[in-house]
Amino acid sequence: MPRDCKYVAQVRADLSEFAALYKAATEYANGSDRFVEIQPGYMAFHFEAYSAHSKFRLYVAGRNLQLSASGDQHMTDLGQTTVETKKATTEPTACFSDDIRKLFKAWKQDKLLEELETHHAELLKRRVDVIQYGDPDKLSAKKRTILNSQVLRQALLHRAECLLIGSGTMLLAKNVYGLALVARGHLEATAVLAYFCNRINALSKGHIQYETVELDIANAIMGSQHELFDKADPQRML
């Protein structure tokens, strides 16, 4: 019988971290189902409960480990790219832990808490199960650009979700500097989206060539501190 653990957090860490991570996953699961897969270069923790998954991600971030939760871009040796994202769920969202929610209530900010959790639920609704990219060499330029745009959209949604969840950790720690970085991250993500909306508008009016937009979107997708993408030249928004 398949195990219903649809919430996955991929942690890129050395195996020396496994014991602590497994202990935390078991604690946050609190009796609900969970299991872990050891893969080359990362560990995939599967959770039945979204609240356990959310708390575990906060724990990983607090240990300064690299977290690649569902929604990150993965490239295979065959040149195929997919974007795996969480399925939309009708379950009550758990954007913040109980301790963080108590902070909002103590500050008499129940309305703000409700608005943030509503925004978080809306983010999840905009995520898709998977974008099957396929072999780039077999795609037309138009199809490739459309798929790149969809990948970029999912990446920005994933960033917004993680930043929103991370803001709770900063509140609990009373880390004003961390909150400032969260705000900056949201501004950067919004600026990226606005930039490409402007590029599409300019293209529709004939002010720029299609090849320019195609290259801009590809650069945005490849913008990463990794040797695989050292030829990318993404736009600096801030």
Image (spheres, rainbow, N blue to C red):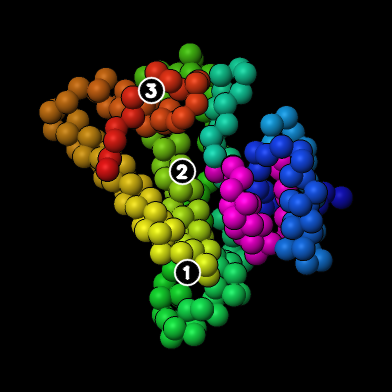
Q: Position of residue 157 (x, y in %)?
A: 44, 49
Residue bearing mark 1: 174
Mark toward the viewer: 2 or 1:
1
Please state the horizontal and vertical placement of residue 135, each as a whole percent of the image.
53, 19
- Crowding near pointer 1: few (<14 within 10 Å), some, many (20+)? few
Taking the spot 29% from the left edge, 35% from the top edge, the residue there is: 236
Label 2 environment density (alpha carbons within 10 Å; few <14, some 14–19, many ≥20): many
Of residues 211 and 111, the one drawn nearer to the viewer in this rendering? 111
**What residue appears at the point 49 percent right and 15 percent down from the top-left corner?**
138
**Disc 2 marks which amino acid?**
Gln
Which residues, given as a range, are shown in magenta? 43-71
Q: CA distance from mark 1 to mark 3?
A: 37 Å
Q: Amino acid at mark 1?
A: Lys
The residue sitting at 37% across, 58% down in the picture is 180
Residue, disc 3: 232
Q: Quadrant of residue 17?
A: top right
SS for callout 1: loop
Q: Position of residue 20 (x, y in %)?
A: 76, 52
Query: Is any atom of residue 59 visible in this view?
Result: yes
Q: Are marks 2 and 3 in contact (CB under 8 Å)?
A: no
- Which numbered dot is residue 57? none
Q: Which residue is mark 2?
A: 154
Q: Nearer the viewer, residue 74 or 41?
A: 41
Q: Is residue 131 above or below residue 2?
A: above
- Front-most of residues 59 and 122: 59
In this picture, residue 226 sits left or right of residue 214: right
